[in-house]
Image (tube, rainbow, N blue to C red):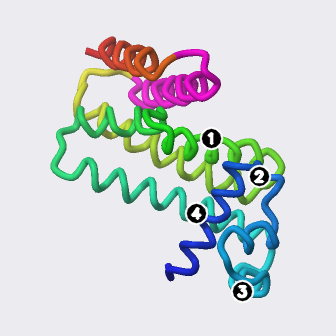
Amino acid sequence: MTTQEIDIVAAVWAVMADQGLAAVSMRTVAAAAGVSVGRIQYRYGTKDQLIRASLETMLSGAEEHHVEVTHGADGRAELWELLSHPIPRAENARRGVAIFHQYVAAASNDPELARLLAEAKAGQERRVTQLLRQLEPGLTQPRTVARSLVATADGLTQQVLIGAISVTTAERTLRRSLARLS
């Protein structure tokens, strides 16, 4: 990805964070990125393609981050990271998670966004299942348990985003869910 493409994607996220996904347009993104509308149209074609490219960048960045932070980690540490990473612990993380949830909401009307998000969630669930099989060999139905843990983490993340619970409460609840496996 070129520096300009990175700037454009960051501008999409800035518009989303400040004004919401509905405000994303070639014009608002061009203004935020400091480039011409024509440059964005040349690279991305349509608003929908721009939004999809920004989601793909977010998902690949999350995957790269996961690989980086879990390099050399044991299975339990990787499992914790896979499940707890979306819980927004800092303000910049809160913005990123809020942007992600805007994509989730938009996916109900955009089959391509839905496909991208479903693939990412399926990958997360597969890896959690693999780790559970390694860490808890006697566990029955590890895929069902993985799905439940992912859903729990997602729900806790949403509760933190809306201010219903604190980050500490979310992490404590998730740790208790994991402790029940042993």
SS for dot 2: helix
Q: Is residue 45 above or below residue 101?
A: below
Give the residues in magenta: 141-165
Q: Nearer the viewer, mark 2 or mark 4?
A: 2
Rounded to the nearest angstrom, the CA distance separating label 3 from label 2 is: 20 Å
Mark 3: which secondary structure?
helix
Which residue is pictured at 31% across the width and 31% down the height?
Answer: 132
The mark total stands at 4
Q: Which mark is in front, 1 or 4?
A: 1
Q: Which residue is mark 2?
A: 21
Q: Earlier in the sequence, mark 3 or mark 1?
A: 3
Q: For the residues marked 1 and 4, what is the alpha-carbon distance in whole angstroms?
A: 16 Å
Which three-letter amino acid code belongs to the residue tagged 2?
Answer: Leu
Give how far across and how far down residue 45 sits, in percent: 77, 81
Q: Nearer the viewer, residue 161 or 67?
A: 161
Residue 26 image point, x, y percent: 80, 72
Q: Secondary structure at mark 4?
A: helix
Q: Amino acid at mark 3?
A: Arg
